[in-house]
Amino acid sequence: MVFGCFPCCSRTGYQQIGNTGPRFGVRHLQCILVFFGLAVAYSLRVNLSVAIVAMTDRNASNPDFPEFDWNESVKSYLLSSFFWGYVVTQVPGGYLSAIYGAKYMLFFGVLICSCLALLTPFCAITGGWKTVVVLRAVQGLCQGVIFPSTHTFLSKWAPTEERGRLVGYSYSGSQFGTVVMLSVSGYIASSSLGWPSTFYVPGCAGILWSFVWYFYCSSTPAEHPTITPAERRYIESSGQTRRPSDVGREVEPRPRTPWLRILTSGPFLVLVLAHCANNWGFWTLLTEIPTFMKSVLGMDIKSNGPLSALPYFAMILLTCVFIWLSDAMKQRGTILPLGFSRKFFNTLGMWLPMLALIGLGYITEGAANVRLAIALLTLAVATNSATYLGFHVNHIDLAPNYAGTLMGITNCAANFMSILAPLIVGLIVWDERNPAQWRIVFFFTAFVYFMGNLLFMLLGRTSVQDWNTPTRTPTATSAAEQREDVAGDRSPLIEA
């Protein structure tokens, strides 16, 4: 294995720390691959939104490439077509990743998206915007499996004690990909490759990542060829009530998904509402704040790539800060209930943006106010990263066996909110230069943030639900299994 040259990564070189597992093991390498996979996926997701400026304005990039006369209506179709397919495959993506393995769903999802990105310039030149709309919708279908499959994958690899940390670091890859794409798109569009390079670069990166992922990743610790028995035991027994001798054993075929019990579970329905509220606020910020700043404050933030990337860059930094804070709270010797930790960070991630939105509602035109608006926008987006240690992890808390399916359901519902929110803003704001109308939008969005987190605080749960593990039916082999358990308790694996 390529990482075998590092003592901390080799099969015999792990540094053991009691019952906490190796400091740096295979599970961390898997999460690093997830980080870069999400970075590629999000760069493929936002590349059209930054390339469309160069595609419709020859002066904005290399003039040697075709220019398209697309009006605002056509641009809206192009930019929204991705989400038409993205919403459809959320639930199937989580369900299929649990059946066939998250490794393969992520592999095919990123690989197909990358290949379609390479075809986009050719389709735009030869087939017109309608062909690109179809292509982007198919890309959305493929990307729809990535997020729930990632949750399925992390539910297998992240021990309970490290769940918030590993999930937080992994999902920060999405912001990293967005930052890179927004920051460099202007430069590569002006290069000799022109605007097509904004599709070629992330497309080639995605194909490269797909094959690295295929050869160095496994869906579960039990399937990984180089993981040590100690690390595998630590991951598989973490937070479980089973005996060590049961770790890694496939007791019976995967049971049927308890759809009815999931959809009628109180803690899960609260999780759905929290996810919807978060997406409503987050996408209102990202889609409408640029219009507000241009119309009310007289500044076009979309024309400045690095400035557009600033909130995402701050989000990456604050993700690391929140993870450090979580670890520091644990190391002070105080036993913090898991429920308190989830709700504390979820409150930071939803109520701090709420306060920033209230502040934006009182900003008027002026140079000083522009700087204040940018600061509040950055604060609102960046502090939302605390939810990675809040409701984002709660799917795995409630049902590790169905984490991908749960994420598929909540993400599907939440993405409907990201489509609905701009439409509601359009009904409220009919005069884009009127600060009073924007104040209504900001206050209503702040109220959504407030209610979403309040419900999560009062009714959210972190205990594993009883429908996560169906009751086993006694079989004729139970006596043989008991004898195997006794033998297993004396095995060298457990004594290691």
Image (cartoon, rainbow, N blue to C red):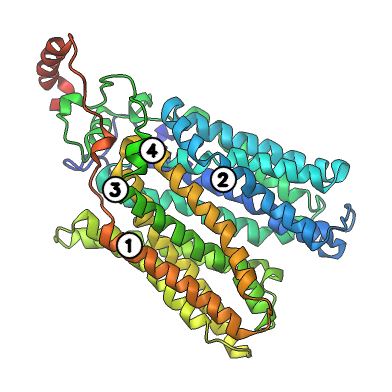
Let me know if residue 327 appears in the view: no
Asked if disc 4 and disc 1 are in contact, CB closer than 8 Å, the reply is no
The residue to which callout 3 is attached is 162
Q: Is residue 368 above or below residue 54?
A: below
Tag 3: Cα neighbours inside 10 Å, few (<14), some, or many (≥20)? some
Viewer-proximal residue, 172 or 443?
443
Looking at the image, tell me whether mark 3 or mark 4 is earlier in sequence order. Answer: 4
Q: Which residue is mark 2?
A: 87
Identify the residue at image location x=52%, y=76%.
Answer: 442
Quadrant of the rendering where the N terminus is positioned:
top left
Alpha carbon separation for disc pair 4 and 1: 46 Å
The residue pinned by badge 4 equals 6
**Mark in the foreground, 2 or 3:** 2
Q: Do tag 2 and tag 1 residues touch (Cβ < 8 Å)?
A: no
Q: Using the numbered discs, state the Cα–Cα distance from disc 2 to disc 3 in whole angstroms.
A: 30 Å
Sequence-wise first label, 2 or 1: 2
* Residue highlighted by disc 1: 455
Q: Disc 2 and disc 1: Cα gap in Å? A: 25 Å
Residue 366 in the figure: left or right of residue 360: right
Q: Position of residue 73 (x, y in %)?
A: 78, 59
Mark 3: which secondary structure? helix
Amino acid, disc 4: Phe
